[in-house]
Image (spheres, rainbow, N blue to C red):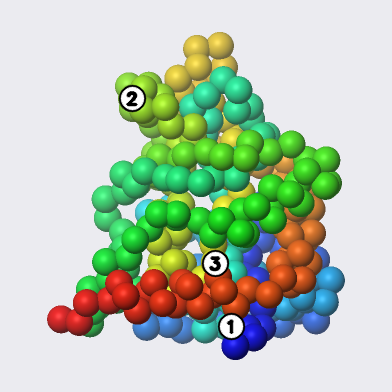
Amino acid sequence: MKYNVKVGIIGGSGLDDPSFFTDSTEHKIDTPYGPPSDSLFSGKINGVDCVLLSRHGRKHSISPSDVNYRANIWALKQLGCTHVIASSATGSLKEQIKPGDLVILDSFIDLTKKRHYTLYSDKVMHIPIEPAFCLTTRNIVIDTAKELGIAVHETGTAVVIEGPRFSTKAESNLYRSWNVDLVNMTLAPEVVLAKEAGLLYCVVAMATDYDCWREATEKVNVANVLKVFQENVEKVTRIFISVVTKIAEKNWDTEIDDLKNLLQESIQSK
């Protein structure tokens, strides 16, 4: 069948303004898992149907550990999204990934402890998570950034920690010993839940700091994280606006059907 594309955008800090939509409509949605982080806004970007959700709420009032990831993903699915492109602030664990750099993640390590990791309560979902991110959407994002002249790191692995505190120096160096690129607080379980919901998911991670491992640099703090994100969010916005158009130009029947079939094969009834 021919699917109608609708792109969900999950905005991290500083990327939650629906003003770049036309025909914007606010939706207050209740879900089986409780309320999402905030109202969702539907509208069009260059004629393409989109939905915007602020991960931490528009007032940035929700801690990474307290984000209702299940409700957020369910709400995007309920509004008809086929794709999710997300932004996320991260700490760099490598010298060559500088604050302000963008990384198109292709893998993650989940060290979170207290979150809900599945949408299912009446069934067991043994979902194969590799590849964690939609390969086709990732390639579109990378190609779009190149066309716009925006430098990105085309691969990267993030270790996801519980937060909301930042790492100790010992933790930061441990992650570095694993050859991990970034440290993050929000990617999991968001990426897993999106896959369970049948959404084609991709994230653009922005390095906002060097965590606390780098002696010559001021240690990570909230003020600097938000400052760097705000200074560079325009790059992410430009990528997203262009990516939405390119996503809408493609026929996604194969990718959506393949994911649907994977989900059916992964469900074990209790």
Asked if residue 18 lies left or right of residue 77, the reply is right
Q: Residue at x 68, y 34 (%)?
A: 100
Q: Position of residue 13 (x, y in %)?
A: 61, 51
Disc 2 designates what residue? 174
Q: Residue at x 49, y 32 (%)?
A: 181
Q: Hey, which quadrant is residue 32 in on the image? A: bottom left
Tag nearer the camera, 1 or 3: 3
Q: Earlier in the sequence, mark 1 or mark 3?
A: 1
Say what secondary structure mark 1 lies in: loop
Q: Position of residue 188 (x, y in %)?
A: 40, 54
The Cα–Cα distance between marks 2 and 3, rounded to whole angstroms, is 32 Å
Q: Quadrant of the C terminus?
A: bottom left
The Cα–Cα distance between marks 2 and 1, rounded to whole angstroms, is 41 Å
Disc 3 designates what residue? 200
The three-letter amino acid code for the residue at tag 1 is: Gly
Asked if residue 116 lies left or right of residue 1, the reply is left
Q: Earlier in the sequence, mark 2 or mark 1?
A: 1
Seen from the viewer's position, the closer of residues 199 and 111 is 199
Disc 1 designates what residue? 80
Say what secondary structure mark 3 lies in: strand
CB atoms at circles 1 and 3 under 8 Å apart? no
Q: Is residue 174 above or below residue 256?
A: above
The three-letter amino acid code for the residue at tag 3 is: Leu
Q: Position of residue 199 (x, y in %)?
A: 51, 71
